[in-house]
Image (tube, helix red, strand yellow):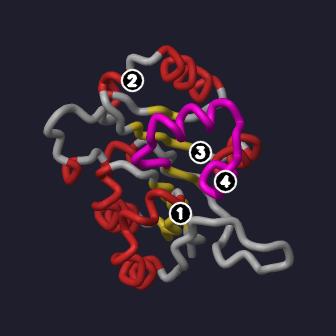
């Protein structure tokens, strides 16, 4: 019997987060046990959906650090997908800033050499900012697969449909075997 692979799906405050259930369901269909972690800002976007997402995943939706001594309610991750990844998260992650649970987890995952995929979702103006390009280059240097337009990832343009977010591309970028 094959052990279940655990995927942390980490969602930031961008419009596709309103459709994170689709990402969870696609990951589950691909054989992953999914744990959903969201940034504090993203939590506001899905508050009403949290009970249903917790039933779907079988795990608490996490957005904040646990207190010292509290048990960890999530199993250890085998891989992580940060989708959608915002301008803020990409830049903080590349700089090693861990001021939120989501960033703490992905920064630790870099050090653990876990498979990591990021799918940025930001405006073309943000993507043109010099810090963003440097951050993407650093994350790739760290071993993170950053999917942009040429890789099947999505940059948000005017009128972009958040329901058309490339969840499949994010999952396809993960290794198939461990």
Residue 53 percent location from the top left of the image: 40, 76
Question: Is tag 2's residue or tag 1's residue first in the polypeptide sequence?
Answer: 1
What element does badge 3 sit on? loop
Question: Is tag 3's residue or tag 4's residue first in the polypeptide sequence?
Answer: 4
**165 horizontally vs 13: left or right:** left
**66 horizontally vs 150: left or right:** right
Q: Which residue is found at the position 21% from the left and 32% from the top? A: 157
Region in magenta: 82-105
Residue 149 percent location from the top left of the image: 30, 27
Q: Which residue is found at the position 33% from the left and 35% from the top? A: 153
Q: Nearer the viewer, mark 2 or mark 1?
A: 2
- Labels 4 & 1 near each other (Cβ < 8 A): yes
Q: Which residue is found at the position 51% from the left and 73% from the top? A: 61
Of residue 115 and residue 22, the one placed in the foreground of this image is 22
**176 horizontally vs 21: left or right:** right
Question: Is tag 1's residue or tag 3's residue first in the polypeptide sequence?
Answer: 1
**Vertically, is 15 above or below 35?**
above
Count of labels in the image: 4
- Whether 152 is among the magenta residues is no
Q: Which residue is mark 2?
A: 127
The furthest residue to the right: 69
Of residue 33 and residue 99, the one placed in the foreground of this image is 99
Q: Which label was assigned to residue 105?
A: 4
Residue 12 percent location from the top left of the image: 45, 51
Q: Which residue is mark 3?
A: 115
**Vertically, is 20 above or below 116?**
below
What element does badge 4 sit on? helix
Q: Residues within 10 Å of mark 4 (few under 14, many from 20)?
A: some
């Amino acid at each position: 019997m094959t052990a279940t692979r655990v995927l942390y799906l980490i969602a930031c405050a961008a419009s596709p987060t309103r459709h994170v259930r689709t990402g969870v369901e696609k990951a589950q269909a691909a054989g992953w046990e999914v744990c959903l972690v969201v940034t504090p800002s993203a939590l506001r976007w899905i508050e009403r959906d949290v009970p249903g997402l917790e039933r779907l995943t079988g795990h608490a939706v996490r957005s904040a650090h646990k207190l010292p001594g509290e048990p960890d309610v999530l199993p250890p991750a085998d891989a992580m997908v940060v989708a959608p990844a915002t301008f803020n998260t990409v830049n903080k992650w590349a700089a090693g800033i861990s001021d939120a649970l989501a960033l703490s987890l992905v920064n630790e995952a870099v050090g653990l050499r876990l498979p990591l995929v990021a799918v940025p979702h930001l405006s073309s103006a943000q993507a043109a900012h010099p810090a963003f390009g440097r951050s993407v280059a650093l994350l790739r240097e760290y071993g993170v697969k950053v999917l942009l337009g040429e890789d099947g990832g999505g940059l948000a343009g005017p009128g972009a449909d958040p329901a058309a977010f490339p969840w499949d591309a994010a999952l396809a970028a993960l290794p198939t075997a461990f």
